[in-house]
Amino acid sequence: MAKEMSGFNTAMEKFPHLNRYVEGFTAAYGETPRFYMSLSRGMAVDQFPNMLYPVGDPIFLHIYRDPERGKRYIVIEPQMDADLKARYRRIMDLALREAPMEKSYADEEEFKEIITRILNKVTTIEELKKERYSRFEADRVRITQEEYKTIQYYIVRDLIESGILEPILRDPYNEDIHSVGLSRIHVIHKIFGMLETSIRFTTECELHEYIRNIAERIGKPVSDAVPIVDGALPDGSRVNIVYSEDISKLGSSFTIRKFTEEPLTFVALTQFGTMSPEIGAYLWLCMENGMSIIISGETASGKTTTLNACLTFINHEHKVYSAEDTPEVIAPQPVWQRLITRPTGPEGSRVELFDLVRTALRSRPNYIIVGETRGVEGNYMFQAMQTGHSVMSTFHAPSTRQLIQRFTGDPINVPIRFIDNLNVALFQQIMYEGGVLIRRVTSVDEILRYSKEMDGVLTRSVFRWDPFTDTHYFRGMNNSYILEDKIAPFLKFEDKRDIYKELEMRARVIKEMVDRNIVEYDRVNRLFRAYYKLKINTIRDIEEKRHWWERALQAA
């Protein structure tokens, strides 16, 4: 706490705009915000939050509960009054006259240096020495040191960074960003759920210009003729734009689903309660031994997060191919081919998702990862399973019955007798519990076989989530078709029931990783890389495995 207070005091001294905001808030509400360098998920239980945290100088974020409007999300950044805005516009005019005299830049850092150099030429402040070679000496704009830093911040924010959205894009705790017309922008916060922010577009012109800039950045220009586009920002975040007011009656809108460069690990998901150690152990056995798995659920239920987390379980000496519309899959295997669609351009040059799945088949990978199955690529995916390839994908369906209905209907049209090429279907949901956003694996089902007599597919549930106790129950003990009839023979277990001892041992390993907080992506994958390099999966002595993991976990 002393460290946090020291950081708060330092920030207040360094950034006058933060000091003014805190003083104003304290005077209005009679309470000073608590300062944190980082947040934790345990804070979600606080029904009356009042916390302030940095997301990169000079930006801070404040989350608090307003008595009338509920939880608010306030962006604290340098402010410009009407007078400074007028001088800012004058400085920009002068800067544009000076810019052609500068050399071209190679990267963002050089661009920032050019901005600083031009600012020094067109402004006058006490602390800055005048540049004698400036051609616009008489046109210099007089500003204070604080105003100089404010103007510099806005030029960099609007020309190099992401403009008005930069503060909330910087926030590592935001998952989604929603903007509809001129209403205030909302975010889905990893800890506090849906929050209304203090950010909004003030005019239709400003909103449309921003949307057009986003569309150009993703290489898919938007217009009244092409009003809906999907794509990925340079950092990998997914963006959906609805440009025309004919379609979006409340005004043009967009949604950004933020990309996490370093995926969450299965250890982190276990800590969060998304899955249990036993589910992790089951998936570990399945993926290590080439079972085909679909992770299914509603939008924003965390399907891709779970998929990425579980890719660690695939043998790190195997070849992995991923096929996606937008790049979200991140595989830790050294031999990983990442394929992305190209839906625009002349008809002959377009590359659709089914083209990528078909191409992956020719490369003989050990695992094919389809980021999200929606159309005819699902048919090729099942063809890959039939030819002996292991496949993993995400899908939109809340149950095995509806999953089978969607795969066997238009536009995928997989013959129902082929569905049993799929081994496991995992289902996940997003929900609110006491105002806190949570995600849970609700069931794990095994696909047994196609029954000609019943003209249907036989399935068996091996894991179920009880919402009343928030507990995952293993219903497949001594009753798992995949473990006993698929994996145990492959591992050459003389007694196929020994597979449950193996499952128990792996669950203990995951529990130990949770207890020791071995949660970082690189750290977890280093352990599994060593595990597969030693080919320890061929050793069927449970005790020998257990001792290896004990030594490895201590070293980690």
Image (cartoon, rainbow, N blue to C red):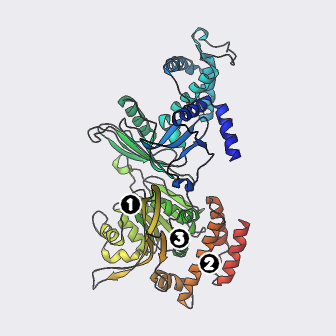
**Residue drawn 57% across and 91% down?**
494
**Tag 2: amino acid:** Asn
- Please give the residue where the numbered disc 1 appears in the rendered image: 298
Viewed as shown, does residue 94 lie left or right of 406?
right
Tell me the CA gap for discs 3 and 1. Answer: 20 Å
On residue 276, the disc is 3
Tell me the CA gap for discs 2 and 1. Answer: 35 Å
Q: Residue 356, position in %: x, y? A: 43, 59
Q: Nearer the viewer, residue 465 or 120?
A: 465
Viewed as shown, does residue 196 lie left or right of 228?
right
Tell me the CA gap for discs 2 and 3. Answer: 22 Å
Mark closer to the observer (2, 3): 3
Q: State the residue lying farthest toward the top.
A: 138
Q: Nearer the viewer, residue 154 or 18?
A: 18
**Tag 3: amino acid:** Ser
* Among numbered discs 3 and 1, the one appearing first in the sequence: 3
Mark closer to the observer (3, 1): 3
- Please give the residue where the numbered disc 2 appears in the rendered image: 537
* Among numbered discs 2 and 1, the one appearing first in the sequence: 1
Viewed as shown, does residue 166 lie left or right of 294?
right
Q: Is residue 237 above or below residue 537?
A: above
Quadrant in the rendering for residue 544: bottom right
Q: Residue 234, position in %: x, y? A: 50, 44
Q: Residues within 10 Å of mark 2 (few under 14, many from 20)?
A: some
